[in-house]
């Protein structure tokens, strides 16, 4: 069934819009992704039939369940695929937070982690440039958490709940993972 849901660029744009905007109507979806209302109507009905959306009158709402969150996380990684690149000076780069778990909305920021050998004076301006470029490319605020293995170990000791959340949600996009 995923092949039918992802069979065209128009459908993928509709899917992304429907899963991150709630509620959504046929007219809003058609206008937002530049497709005709007939296609938007048929596709939103298919998403209801497949269990990703529910309908209440003219409004469609995302069904918050593991299947929907997994599909959103997949779409998020696909959207980032050609926009996020590991800098030469980094060991790894990845995703965490709502974009990683598939719970993001149109208002969510993009949380990335960047693993480096050491944090030097050139790191901060380089990270700021990456954040600016990614924010522009993705249409949302991007924030990058810069980590070294020592900083990761300190996080484990000083902020264990955040550390566990980061380790549970982290998805490596390029390079090495955060796993010790």
Image (cartoon, rainbow, N blue to C red):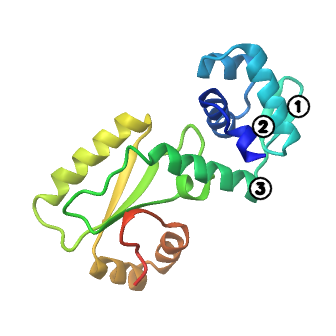
Classed neighbour count for the residue bearing mark 1: other residues with Cα under 10 Å, few (<14), some (14–19), many (≥20): few
**Residue 137 vs residue 106: left or right?**
left
Please, what secondary structure does the residue beneath circle 3 have?
loop
The answer to which image quadrant residue 67 occupies is bottom right
Circle 1 SS class: strand
Q: Which residue is mark 3?
A: 65
In the image, which is nearer the foreground, mark 1 or mark 3? 3
Q: CA distance from mark 1 to mark 3?
A: 18 Å
Residue 61, labelled with which disc?
Answer: 2
State the mark number for residue 56.
Answer: 1
Crowd band around label 3 with a 10 angstrom C-alpha radius: few (<14), some (14–19), many (20+): few
Q: Residue at x 17, y 59 (%)?
A: 123
> Where 126 sits versus 42, above or below?
below
Real-space Cα separation, disc 1 to disc 2, in angstroms: 8 Å
Q: CA distance from mark 3 to mark 2?
A: 12 Å
Number of marks drawn: 3
Estimate the x, y position of residue 46 in percent, counting from the top left: 83, 34
Residue 66 occupies which quadrant of the picture?
A: bottom right
Q: Are circles 3 and 2 on residues that touch, CB within 8 Å?
A: no
28 w.r.t. 135: above or below: above
x and y percentages locating residue 33 in the rendered image: 60, 22
Between 109 and 48, the one lying in front of the other is 48
State the image quarter where residue 94 is shown.
Answer: bottom left
The residue positioned farthest toward the left in the image shown = 121
Residue at (77, 55) in percent of width and height = 65
The earlier-in-sequence mark between 1 and 2 is: 1
Q: For this view, does 75 lie left or right of residue 111?
A: right
| Residues marked 1 and 2 touching at CB (< 8 Å) | yes
Query: Residue 45 at what x, y percent from top left?
Result: 84, 30
């Amino acid at each position: 069934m995923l092949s039918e849901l992802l069979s065209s660029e128009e459908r993928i744009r509709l899917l992304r819009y429907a899963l991150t905007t709630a509620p959504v109507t046929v007219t809003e979806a058609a206008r937002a992704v530049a497709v005709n209302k007939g296609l938007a109507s048929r596709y939103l009905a298919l998403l209801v039939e497949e269990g990703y959306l529910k309908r209440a009158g003219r409004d469609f709402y995302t069904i918050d369940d593991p299947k929907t969150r997994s599909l959103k996380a997949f779409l998020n990684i696909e959207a980032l695929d050609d926009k996020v690149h590991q800098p030469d000076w980094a060991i790894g780069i990845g995703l965490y937070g709502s974009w990683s778990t598939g719970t993001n909305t149109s208002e969510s920021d993009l949380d990335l982690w960047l693993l480096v050998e050491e944090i030097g004076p050139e790191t901060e301006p380089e990270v700021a440039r990456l954040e600016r470029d990614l924010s522009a490319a993705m249409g949302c605020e991007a924030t990058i958490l810069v980590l070294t293995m020592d900083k990761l170990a300190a996080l484990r000791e000083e902020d264990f709940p955040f550390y566990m959340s980061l380790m549970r949600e982290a998805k490596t996009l390029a390079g090495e993972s955060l796993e010790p």
